[in-house]
Image: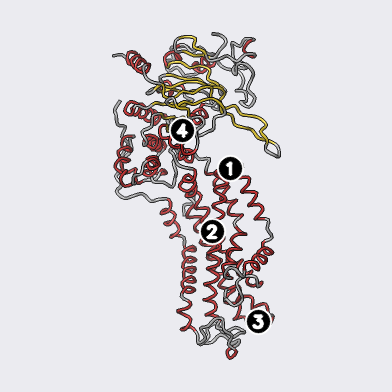
Amino acid sequence: MTTRDFIQERIDSLQNRDVLLEVQNLKTYYPVTGGFFKRVVGNVKAVDDVSFSVRKGETLGLVGESGCGKSTTGRTILRLLKPTDGKILFEGKDITKISGSRLQKARRDFQMVFQDPYASLNPMQMVGDIVAEPILNYEKRSRKELEPEIKKLLTRVGLPEEAYYKYAHEFSGGQRQRIGIARALALNPKLIVADEPVSALDVSVQSQVLNLLKELQIEFDLTYLFIAHDLSVVKHMSDRIGVMYLGNLVELASNRDLYREPLHPYTQALISAIPEPNTAIKKERIVLKGDVPSPQNPPTGCPFHTRCPMAMEVCSKDKPLLTEVRPGHHVACHLY
Amino acid sequence: MATTSTLTQQKKPERSLSPWQIARKKFLKNKLAMISSVFIILVTLLSLAAPFLAPYLSSIPDVSKVNISSMNITPNSEHWLGTDKSGRDVLTRLLYGGRISLLVGFSATVLVISIGTLVGSIAGFFGGVVDSVLMRFTDFVLNFPFLVFVIVLNTILMGIVDGLWVLIIVIGLLSWGGVARLVRSKVLAEKENEYIMAALSIGCSPFKVIVKHLLPNVMSTIIVQATLIFASMIVVESALSYLGFGVPQSTPSWGNMLSSANEPDVLQGKQWIWMPPALVIIFTILSINFIGEGLKDALNPKSLR
């Protein structure tokens, strides 16, 4: 079986599965306060009208440059941030508005792997306690009773069993990230939001952690929302990829389609920036002019029109909607 | 791809040291802090044992009774530190005074740290309106004229509660503002770390996040602050008692003993009456400060001493 067949088989198998997570017109604004009475004088539109859905067992990658709202999207979906508007449906249930103990209960099914392996582990807790804590939050069991289970989990993510008795500061970045993964796995969740899980790691360690995540996905039937800014990392991990720009989802397509035939000018520019290892192939690099506009005061119409090499008159007036221009290939651009 | 990505395994049978154990190790190596600790423990033990020691130390073990026959005796073999103008043995009073001064200092510190930590951590963690309300209240408390309030509250409460505890409560209720501000600022900095968000995402309640994740990480600051407050509380007690608004005059305390130096005659001619409490206060406070300094070094992960 060739790689292509393998990928095709995976795509087919995912097609028939249920939707696990559905995000509809999600908006997350950070209020900007000013003046003596701290009145709200504006909003940073970190996530501005984003919609997508993720099927069970699938990996949806979110890419974009820093500040485009991809982390905010992930955190809002887990309800670690308050959504301003829109809907988040998890297994068909609306989790946008729930709070308090109901939210706490719901969190059992969706976990997060954090970006900074140095800040995401409590330095005062023993690794065993860090990994056992999520279970202890939901089940009435003793720490002693859990010990063999936690040790097994630690070995599964590639750590020695003795790690149980150690503290986070005794581990390297990659090992810490494995602890973070073990913590996220402890509750056997359905969805894991991985917020740039490897961007703080060495390249050599990155691949180990990525492969671990892939193995775990098959073993535990996990669904990933994989957030990253590194295009090759996203390509390696994802079944489908969403490209974000200034709080908007500008293109959403399968892994193959996106890299082979990017439709949105921004995606084209991004993909042209991937270094080509084969020097014989001459690649045309699309260099964008200017800077990303402020999300506090985004441009009218298409958010990208200020830097788009193919901007038309309509682009500055009407905001293009994300539409399916080819089967499974969505793009928000007036060109199509 | 192999299913297990094994890492180089080092066999270490024993458990790793927790951050607290590391701090203890560092503290035990700090000579000045250790000497100070020994001194404080000695003073505390001697004070606690005062009722048992008193009969052996002098022929007049009663510390509150006036004894006309033995007034103003200079230090000798019977009265090691002499007697005061009411004929009471200075050494015995010093030991009994230690009980009161240390009790007031310790209890007031516990009260101050508890209120300050509670207010500070809630304000820092929840932020927003909760933070604004609590911190404005803290500013309000910080702006109370301390002495005036102590005197007024002391007078009001005097009949209701036992004199000593009035002082402790009054000092405690008026001094927690600084601790609240400090804890709040530490919590604000600490809660930006991703592990706090991680704690929420694994299903901890806000209360559990504060108690299990935030407080242990700001505890080092609180402990150091507590030692410094302990020292200043002893000073406050002494100062108030010296002024006559502290512990009731009948109860011996270091501050009350010092107040006898009010009289020029005692201050100039009978140094044995006020020197001992003064020296004990100075050395106690110095020691507590050295311990605080030692704790600061020990709890700071960056210091290597």
Q: The residue marked by circle 1 belongs to what chain?
A: B
| Residues at marks 3 and 2 on the same chain | yes
Q: Amino acid at mark 1?
A: Gly
Percent from the top left, x then y, of residue B177? 61, 54
Among numbered discs 3 and 1, the one appearing first in the sequence: 1
- Pointer 3 residue: B266
Do the residues under discs 4 and 3 have CB atoms within 8 angstroms? no
Label 4: state its secondary structure: loop
Q: CA distance from mark 3 to mark 1?
A: 55 Å
- Pointer 1 residue: B127
Residue occupying image coordinates x 37% and y 36% = A187
- Mark 1, other Cα within 10 Å: few <14 / some 14–19 / many ≥20: some
Q: CA distance from mark 2 to mark 4?
A: 38 Å
- Pointer 2 residue: B226
Q: Kindly identify which numbered label has been placed on residue A200.
A: 4
Residue at the outermost right position:
A36
Percent from the top left, x then y, of residue A297? 65, 24
Q: Is residue B297 above or below residue A23?
A: below
Frontmost of labels 3 and 1 is: 1
Residue at the outermost bottom position:
B69
Q: Amino acid at mark 4?
A: Ala
Do the residues under discs 3 and 2 have CB atoms within 8 angstroms? no
Frontmost of labels 4 and 1 is: 1
Frontmost of labels 4 and 3 is: 3
Percent from the top left, x then y, of residue A174? 40, 35
Label 2: state its secondary structure: helix
